[in-house]
Image: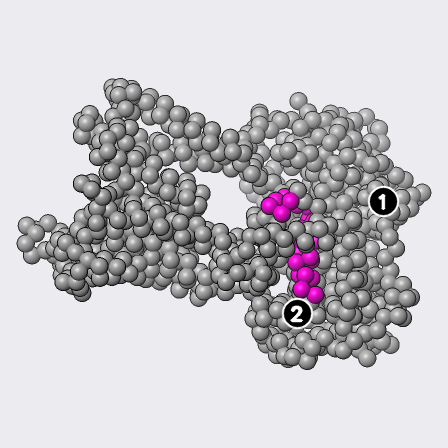
Amino acid sequence: MTSSYLESDTIPPGASAPEGDGSPEAVAMVGITKRFGSVVANDNVTFSARRGEVHALIGENGAGKSTLMSVLAGMYRTDGGILRINGQEVAFRSPRDAIAHGIGMVYQHFMLVDSFTVTENVLLGQRESGLGLDIERTARELAELSRHYGLGVDPRAHIWQLSVGEQQRVEILRLLHRGARTLVFDEPTAVLTPQESEDLIRTLREMAAEGFCIIFISHKLDEVLAVADRITVLRRGTVAGTLDARTTTRPEIARMMVGRELAGTLLNEADVTDHRLGEVVLDLRDVRAGGDKGLPALNGVSLEIRAGETLGIAGVAGNGQRELAEVITGLRPVEGGEIALKGKRITNRHPREIARAGVAHVPEDRLGTGLVGTLDLSNNAIMRTYREKPIARGPYLAARAIAHFADRLIGEYEVKTPGRSTRLRDLSGGNQQKLLIARELAGEPAAIVAVHPTRGVDVGASESIHGVLRAQRLRGAATLLISEDLDELLTLCDRIAVIYEGRIMGIVPSRQADPEQIGLMMAGTVMPAAGSLPA
Amino acid sequence: MSQEVITAPAADAGPRWRLERVSKPSLAAQILVPAFSIVAALVAGGVIMLLAGENPVEVYRAMAKGAFGSSYNLSETIVKMIPLLLAGLGVAVAFRMRLWNIGAEGQFYFGAIFATFVALYMLPDAPSIVLIPAMVVAGMLGGGLWGGIPGVLRGLWGVNETITTLMLNYVAILFSEWLVHGPWKNPVGFGFPGTKTFPEAAWLPTWGTTRVHLGLVFGLVAAAILFVVLRRTRWGYEISVAGESERVARYAGMATSRNIIIVLVLSGALAGLAGMSEVSGVGHQLQRSLSPGYGYTAIIVAWLGRLNPLGIIVVSFLLAGLLVGGDQLQISLGLPAAIAPMLQGTILFFLLGADILTRYRLVRVQPEVRA
């Protein structure tokens, strides 16, 4: 019942076969309201997308983008509103209902079984396929679909053999095979290299040209402008407006998203020329370490970061970034080489000693590593200082000093919260991150290791975090900034190093950096270009 | 969204219900829901009793009287409360760090065994002032040792403590059986499995003519100390962080392995103190089936008390009342022995169910995107 046209063993002529009444509207959501407890995630949202267009859904974190699309994909039921598919009113009870109406969603976290092949993953969960699995026939169908849409996926490959970008294309293939005509992508480029992102954008454009309806959730302005025909901006659960991508501008979208203009962000001339770098603060010599699976993750990394310098680490996720941050902060054993802070060896010291010596750590996952969601803000604020006066009084904790300290962090970093006794989990991602950064920087650390400091954070908070990092640079902190967002690196860093399979492929001054060159290094090309060696 | 949502599989048709986590249960919910659940439990129990041909009102009155109706009955309830309180505190300490110590029963026995050894074989002639503190220390050492073994295994090598603590219960109980049937058996005990009676210096002082003994003070003091330690000290803070996430604790530079071991030793020591006060305060000997499952009931006590030492004082008292009142039914009304445990089970069932309802909220989900 879902595999519709595949029964005939032929690929449909692309743009044809619009079902329903022939109106161009593939999806119409009218007055959708969705509450979670007392939180209204979508408040009377009206949204529509046409066949043949890429429609971007943009908004800050918590604006309600993912909730709205989860309603469309049958994951949630609404508390009110009408859903029309191809002009026909429908009611979804499950994702299965949604896919039966041709609506499929590609999530940020892929739902694939590593040890299965592409074909097996596609067949997985297709109840309609009966007892006997016709793997061969499905594989042939998938190969044909893959060829037709230029996805380049081998149906017989195992998932673990595939890159993240390829796995994403497997998800697309799976939805196509089930007959999806409207595809929803939830921040699809978050996990991709710049090159892969470009490829994806091209694929999506082509699919739209064939008559598919593509809905693209994002909070990156540039890619939205590159991919979309129309852009709907959500703000705090309501629609702020729908724009034509050809005529709108970055500032206009940003204004709609946050209700104000973004400040210019690039390090300007004066930032660089008038800024003096100090002594070497953080010094890594030929550092080697293993990853979680026992394979080498860092294969001789050497870096020098001076006081007042921000060194960016660019690279595709999983090339040793996390391990690099962890060896510096003492969370992962160093197997070879030396790490020094201001000339003093800190190799394999206890995390507490390293933190006390002046290394701040903004870890990759806030809630899993750096913060405890179920504790309140006060308890999260004192994680670094609870052993020291005035927070500690002998073996006891001084409640008044804690309150004072927590309020100070909340005030200085403008953490939006009802109060210090609020459970951390009840804050937005951006405010959680602000508190974490406030805590880590409270002791004016000599060095800062920041990993994806603005990932999953809304534009407003992300801007203020960038401001904080810039201020730290001016104060004279040596910062190692690991990020997958090239724009972020270009706007904050003095130099950018590219990491690939645990090796530094090259280091370039960010003002001379060419995104394409960095992209190539991220994909493993060694660049013997000028400026690739640290001075 | 920050809400944890438990949803039934979406396959069913019609309106659905689901549980949504409540971020902070309201005070009204915290009081009203348990109160309502007790009423519901009594009604459910009453229906069953009616079917069995008993008058529920009569039975409940007898139960309440049996538990709290006279100073004697009240004192018996307090006697039963003592081991539940101490062992419940022990369980709560471990649960706070998300260490699932379900070995309070075995730790209870080992505390009793160590205390018995001191009373009968180490310092049998010592005066009370020496002997009782020595037994306290021994009891806590015994329980602490029995909690420490899983603690070391978990802390150093990550061995699952749920399994090890459970298994060690059987070892402890059977070891104690062997002692009272074998080497420690009272030679003039007419064949009953049990040790000699302790010298009187080893008996915990009692309150007036009742059987309420000094163990109550141990329990209340332990609860007060724990309350302060868990809320107001650096160590208590480390436990609360590590209990939520071991990764965060490592990130913050906390000595996780050491804390795991300390917590399980402390947890066992409290259960051991419960065992010590039971032999020293009530039985005055180590005997077979010393505990009617106090170590397991302690898990329920800790949970219903929300792992809060003050809550545990209240819950251990009420639960002890339920046990004593149930036992009284057999005596006062001549009810079948099975009625009391049935009622106890019903009431616990409703209480634990209510506990979920204060933390989660039942929400009716609109059956359709649009009805």
> What residue would you read off at disc 2?
A358
A372 to the left or right of A204: left
Q: How many C-alpha atoms fall within 10 Å of the one at disc 1: few (<14), some, or many (≥20)?
A: few
> Residue A374: x and y, percent?
56, 48
The magenta span reads A419-444
Q: Nearer the viewer, residue B104 or B118?
A: B118
**Mark-to-mark CA distance, 2 and 1:** 36 Å
- Is B292 drawn above or below residue A383 in the view shown? above
B333 to the left or right of B43: left
Please check the rendered image and state whether residue B211 is part of the magenta-colored stretch, yes or no.
Answer: no
> What residue would you read off at disc 1?
A260
Q: Which amino acid type is marked by label 1?
A: Arg
> Residue B329: x and y, percent?
22, 29
| Mark identifier at residue B279 | none
Q: Is residue A159 visible?
A: no
Question: Which quarter of the figure is the N terminus of chain B placed in?
Answer: top right
Q: Which amino acid type is marked by label 2?
A: Gly
User: Residue at left 76%, top 73%?
Assistant: A307
